[in-house]
Amino acid sequence: MSNYHIKHLEEYWQVYRKSVRNPEMFWEEIAEEHFLWRKKWDKVLSWDFSTPEIKWFEGAKLNITENCLDRHLATRADKTAILFEPNDPGEAAQHITYRQLHERVCRMANVLADHGVGKGDRVCIYLPMIPELAVSLLACARLGAVHSVVFAGFSATALSTRINDCDCKLVICSDGSYRGKKTIDLKTIVDEALEDCPGVGTSLVVRRTGGKVSMQEGRDRWMQSLLDAAEPDRPATIVDAEDPLFILYTSGSTGKPKGMVHTTGGYMVYTAYTFKNAFQYREEDVYWCTADIGWITGHSYIVYGPLANGATSVMFEGVPSYPDYGRFWEIVKKHQVSQFYTAPTAIRALAKENIDFVNKHDLSSLKVLGTVGEPINEEAWHWYNENVGKKNSPIIDTWWQTETGGIMISPIPYSTPTIPTFATLPMPGIQPVLMDESGQEIQGNSVEGRLAIKFPWPSIARTIYGNHERYRETYFTAYPGNYFTGDGALRDTVGYYRITGRVDDVIIVSGHNLGTAPIEDAINEHPAVAESAVVGFPHDIKGNALYGYVTLKETGEGRDPENLRREINQLITDRIGPIAKLQKIQFTGGLPKTRSGKIMRRILRKIASKDTANLGDISTLLNPEVVQTIMDESLA
Ligand code: WTA
């Protein structure tokens, strides 16, 4: 018997030890007993972290939508699969059953196939949080096509870069989206992006807002009429376990975004297993993750993990502040949500508002509270525990990444005793290690270092699309033989992990990963700008906010700084999206540099954080005198 569902702490330890002693046997048992395979694997795992090459369930054949949809039809056809809660609380929620979801996915798969989409083809999805978004992912998967979802808050430039990087031929989009009081014309953004995407022959447009859009003859088609005309059934295309399921872009510290490639079999097994255990999901539960499907959290824990378990997964279109700051809690009450999964930035924002927004809603249906995306600070943890969980719902602080595919370190609720700010213990099969600066593994407890993982797990990303060398270099060269996460962590006296934050130039703002390099590139496009450096500094709601140091060309001197700031932020909004806007912009005469010309971001970070007591040795800088000037200016 496999240990698919852990129910207490001793069982966790027993399962964990087994999973580390023999990972192949552990995952093989789970894969065999809980999923539908058209053909079993020849080999459970082959791996080499130096090439690097990782294969799980090689030779196996399956379709993930048969696991997420078809197999539930016998027992759960009329159970709600997706519970859609619209932006406007006056619009009715939609309870989409497994039978209906199956039909909608098949129809859309037929439409995509009619437009030439087949196995291995990349499809870009740029949609708001409406049911068609989940349907689109699954429709691609049904055909063995590879989806590449781009978060619908990204700009036209960010969208076209991602479309071109993985050579998408078709885009699924909508006329617009609703976010609180705002209506956003997404189609206009897509039109602008597609001017730079000669490879895209078709865009299928979902109607949501009913806003006026321009439809380009021969390229753009309304989705609904095609769906209505399509056959309601379609057999699933059978793929190999190691065939790609999707590409999802994430920011790196340098260069363009990385298209992380996830494959089918291992991803399915791992997301389903971790969903079941991290959330202690039970058949009658209603589960809600507030993330957007444009991020990995939505892929793994709104769509694939929950549906593979036959769960009811809430999909919320709106924002936590509309029509008021009680919206999350109103939805919890309305749909009797049992597991609630959100980001620390949302918790901090809501904690600032009047507590009546929470207290006026009955939250007694809640059993598990989760957080993800960035470290949760102690104050937010306690607020969540006391006011939302009423000290009755364990909080799971789940650490993981786009690259890891699923939750890596997290308490098992009702089993693992929790401590604020600690992600606690690894999930079964996960072998974390802490590394020191010299590349040695740090043994024992009460230690701090850089977090790496020394053994593969089924849902690790297999490559960066089109750039395997970058994949090797980014994740497997810092500590040869290990996967390097980019995060720092400490291990306390009992072996619990606490994630301390990024140790590279990725900054997490409101839970979104932002690389400094693309933001600096956008700033430097301004004709008056000579050079720039972007760093993060603490912000009480966003976790981090962005601080830009900018030097001007002669032509920029004497220009109104407020106008320049506005223009720079507009450039960033155009190139990346509003999430990357700078909170503060300091114009300065020079940036601190090493003798080899590298900008010393470490020093700038300290100045931005007003932590200048200990700047470290600055005497080796090329221009140590600018440091004092920058400090004086920042106080001015
Ligand atoms: C950070 C999100 C502390 C971390 C699933 C990681 C966290 C990055 C936590 C990945 C957590 C995520 N505690 N930090 N519980 N969860 N992070 O790719 O720095 O959007 O490397 O994946 O978020 O962000 P990504």
Image: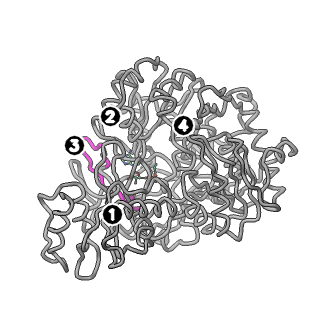
- Quick one: label 1 or label 4, which is nearer the N terminus? 4
Q: Earlier in the sequence, mark 3 or mark 2?
A: 2
Classify residue 634 by image quadrant.
bottom left
Label located before the other in sequence (1 or 3): 3
Question: Label 1 to label 4, Cα distance in Å?
Answer: 32 Å
- 10 Å crowding of disc 1: few (<14), some (14-19), many (20+): some
* Dot label at residue 381: 2
Callout 1, which amino acid?
Answer: Pro
Q: Amino acid at mark 4?
A: Gly
The image's colouring method is: one colour
Which residue in the protein does label 1 denote? 561
Q: In the structure shown, which secondary structural element does the residue marked by tag 3 occupy?
A: loop
Marks 3, 2: nearer the viewer: 2
Mark 3, Cα crowd under 10 Å, few <14 / some 14-19 / many 20+, is few
Viewer can see residue 143: yes
Marks 4 and 3 sit apart, C-alpha to C-alpha, by 45 Å
Q: Relative to 19, is 317 above or below?
A: above
Query: Which mark's residue is nearer the viewer, 4 or 3?
Result: 4
The picture quadrant where one finds residue 82 is: top right
Report, in whole angstroms, how far the alpha carbon at label 1 lies from the one at label 3.
51 Å
CB-based contact (under 8 Å), mark 1 and mark 4:
no
Q: Residues within 10 Å of mark 2 (few under 14, many from 20)?
A: some
Q: Which mark is residue 493?
A: 3
Mark 1 CB lies closer than 8 A to ligand 1: no
